Amino acid sequence: MADHQEASVTLPSDPVSVSAARRYVADVLSEWGLPAGAAVADTVRLIVSELATNAVQHTLGQSPTFTVDVQLDRDERLRIGVTDSHPRYPKRLPAAVQQDNGRGMVIIRWLTAECGGRLSVCPTAEGGKTVWITLPWSVPVQS
């Protein structure tokens, strides 16, 4: 078994890529031993959906693709990052009760914190950014 595992996929900034990103991460985590029915699996799928949706909707056509990175340090932590080439960092918008969107970052932060994790945003060398979530991982790693 590897102590560190990584996987990544680059997808077009298109709404259909959101479900592709979600499936990709779910498949990778399943290969690494996370049962599909685990509560944290549902949480991760929702977080990836929100991050990918943000990468598609809020880059204003300036990011033709986005990349999803999955990193696992055995028995320690899971990191998932979504990278796009738009320089603007995500903003937490005030969400009105009647508002249909704008709650993505609030949802991501809340779910990440509920799992004992953290969220960070880092600039890329190319001028974009990566939004990372880091979650504790205690599932035995399969090789």
Image (cartoon, rainbow, N blue to C red):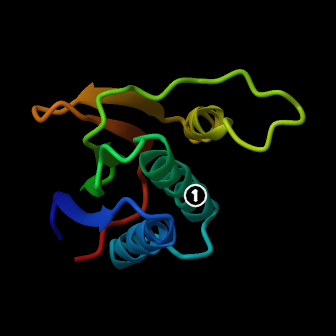
User: In which quadrant is the N terminus drawn?
Assistant: bottom left
Q: Residue furthest left?
A: 125
Residue at 55% from the left image edge and 39% from the top image edge: 112
Provide the residue designation for mark 1.
40
On the image, the x and y values in percent for residue 117 come to: 48, 35
Looking at the rendered structure, the kind of residue marked 1 is Val
On the image, the x and y values in percent for residue 79 come to: 33, 47
On the image, the x and y values in percent for residue 52 come to: 45, 54
Q: Quadrant of residue 129?
A: top left
Q: Residue furthest right?
A: 98
On the image, the x and y values in percent for residue 2 come to: 15, 65
Position of residue 24 relative to residue 41, above or below, is: below
Q: Nearer the viewer, residue 56 or 136?
A: 56
Q: In which quarter of the image is residue 87?
A: top left
Position of residue 66 relative to residue 11, above or below, is: above
Question: Is 127 positioned to the left or the right of 138 in the image?
Answer: left
Residue at 47% from the left image edge and 40% from the top image edge: 58
Residue at 57% from the left image edge and 40% from the top image edge: 108
Position of residue 35 relative to residue 119, above or below, is: below
Q: How crowded is mark 1: few (under 14 residues within 10 Å), some or many (20 or more)?
A: some
Q: Which of 47 and 57 is in front in this view?
A: 57
Position of residue 131 relative to residue 61, above or below, is: above
Q: Residue furthest front?
A: 61
Question: Is 143 positioned to the left or the right of 95 in the image?
Answer: left
* Label 1 SS: helix
Q: Nearer the viewer, residue 71 or 58?
A: 58
- Across the whole image, how many numbered discs are drawn on residues? 1
Q: Quadrant of residue 11?
A: bottom left
User: In which quadrant is the C terminus drawn?
Assistant: bottom left
Residue at 37% from the left image edge and 26% from the top image edge: 88
